[in-house]
Image: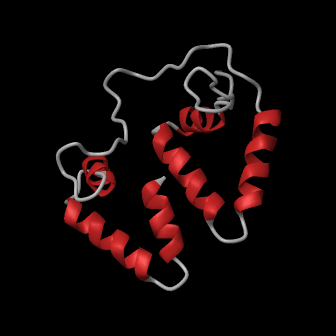
Amino acid sequence: MSSPKRLYRNSSAGRIAGVCAGIAEYVDADVTLVRLAWVVLTIVPGFFVGGIVAYIAAWAIMPASSNPSNAEAGTRHLTRSTTDRKLAGVCGGLAEYFRVDSTVVRLLWAILTIVPGCIVLGIVAYFV
């Protein structure tokens, strides 16, 4: 019987403390998606302080990993597109990652940005 999967901070692959990198490794996801989700959930009105406090708490609670990152060479990574860009390549990069048409991603982003209450979130998330 194998031991259960453990959640660790991955400081070697992290930007600040490795919390998002550790979560991404645990759920077998791209670290950029986890970081993006954390930022979006942090800038939702009313959660800004909570997102920062949650990150600091996770930093304190999660043990540091003693192993280097085990990211594979063939793993896809979420990056801005260098070829399919209108402003900064964010929507083009999302479309390339999810293998969908970039026009659909741009349209969804525009709709979500225009919806009342989401305009600030959509604009800030784009630049993040």
Task: Report the residue at 58% width, 29% height from top.
Answer: 14
Res 104 → quadrant: bottom left
Residue occupying image coordinates x 57% and y 33%: 21
Give percent across and percent down for residue 75. 35, 30
Question: Seen in the image, is 76 located left or right of residue 83?
Answer: right
Say above or below: 75 vs 37. Answer: above
Q: Where is residue 29? Give x, y as percent.
A: 48, 40
Q: Residue drawn at (63%, 67%), measured in percent from left and top?
A: 44
Which quarter shows the N terminus?
top right
Vertical side of 70 occupied by 128: above or below:
below
Judged left or right of residue 93, residue 13 is: right
Where residue 19 sits, quadrant-wise, is top right
Residue 23 x/y as whole percent: 61, 38
For residue 111, say whether it is visible: yes
Q: Residue furthest bottom?
A: 116
- Pick whichever, 81 or 70, lies toward us: 81
Q: Residue at x 48, y 76 (%)?
A: 119
74 with respect to 68 (left or right): left
Residue 29 in sight from this viewpoint: no
Above-or-below relation of 16 to 36: above
For the residue pair 55 and 29, the one nearer the viewer reads as 55
In the image, 15: left or right of 55?
A: left
Outermost residue toward the front?
87
